[in-house]
Image (spheres, rainbow, N blue to C red):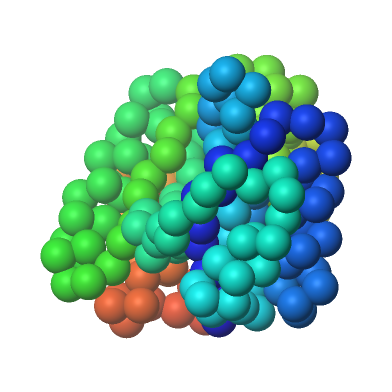
């Protein structure tokens, strides 16, 4: 059970602590929190809370002195669903996105909510940092590495990400990263297509059964 709420509260150092404490007192666990804006000393935050329904969450916040108002919203999972993340060189990223967006459209018409996020990066350090950050991205379900050569610290980052339960697909490229990922695909369009199929409930594709293969 997950409830989502938008809260307006006094922008003071103790305000968020009061809100989180009130949620914990009634058995809720904070899943996500973002503060998109502060206007005239009033902050606005989006919260998703596990373990409470909408009524219980609203009641918990009603007694917090710092809270100026709140309203129920929908969870990001319910609005945007799952995400495929594509990282690498610009031309390869664009081709992977082509396959992923086309496939996502097909499944979204059948009730899925899958989005595709891309970033073109160069440099081992930058790409490795991006790979590690995927573990902290809300709704991220699969990473595709699209480039010509990747290894070293990127390979280490891929292994760490997979330990967090996020599968990784890579294009067939130079470097050791192809030995660390779940699946290697030569065609970038097909790589994007398979990434979406791997996370779609409406697809008959099990990435675990393809693990270690090259296409």
Location of residue 36 in the rendering, given as x and y in whole percent from the top left corner: 54, 32
The quadrant in which residue 156 appears is top right
- Asked if residue 169 shows in the view, the reply is no
Q: Is residue 27 left or right of residue 76?
A: right
Q: Is residue 12 left or right of residue 174?
A: right
> Is residue 79 positioned above or below 189 on the image?
below
Nearest the eye: 25 or 177: 25
Nearest the eye: 149 or 98: 98
Location of residue 109 in the rendering, given as x and y in whole percent from the top left corner: 14, 65
**Quarter the C terminus occupies:** bottom left
**Quarter the N terminus occupies:** bottom right
- Asked if residue 19 shows in the view, the reply is yes
Residue at the image position 59 percent from the left and 77 percent from the top: 56
Residue at the image position 37 percent from the left and 45 percent from the top: 116
Nearest the eye: 212 or 40: 40
Q: Is residue 116 left or right of residue 210?
A: left
Residue at the image position 44 percent from the left and 55 percent from the top: 71
> Is residue 137 positioned above or below 118 on the image?
below
Residue at the image position 82 percent from the left and 60 percent from the top: 21
Location of residue 90 in the rendering, given as x and y in whole percent from the top left corner: 42, 22
Q: Is residue 11 left or right of residue 85?
A: right
Location of residue 179 in the rendering, given as x and y in whole percent from the top left corner: 69, 53
The quadrant in which residue 188 appears is top left
């Amino acid at each position: 059970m997950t409830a989502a709420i938008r809260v307006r509260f006094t922008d003071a150092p103790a305000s968020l602590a009061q809100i989180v404490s009130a949620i914990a007192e009634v058995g809720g666990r904070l899943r996500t929190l973002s503060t998109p804006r502060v206007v005239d000393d009033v902050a606005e935050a989006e919260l998703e809370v596990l373990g409470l329904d909408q009524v219980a969450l609203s009641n918990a916040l009603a007694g917090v002195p710092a809270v100026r108002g709140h309203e129920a919203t929908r969870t990001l999972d319910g609005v945007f669903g799952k995400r495929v993340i594509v990282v690498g060189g610009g031309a390869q990223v664009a081709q992977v996105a082509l396959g992923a967006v086309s496939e996502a459209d097909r499944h979204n018409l059948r009730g899925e909510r899958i989005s595709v996020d891309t970033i073109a990066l160069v440099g081992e350090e930058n790409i490795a940092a991006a790979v590690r950050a995927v573990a902290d991205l809300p709704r991220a379900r699969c990473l595709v590495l699209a480039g010509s050569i990747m290894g070293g610290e990127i390979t280490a980052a891929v292994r760490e990400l997979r330990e967090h339960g996020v599968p990784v697909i890579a294009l067939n490229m130079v470097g050791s990263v192809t030995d660390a990922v779940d699946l290697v695909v030569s065609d970038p369009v097909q790589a994007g297509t398979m990434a979406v199929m791997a996370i779609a409930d409406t697809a008959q594709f099990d990435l675990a059964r393809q693990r270690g293969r090259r296409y």
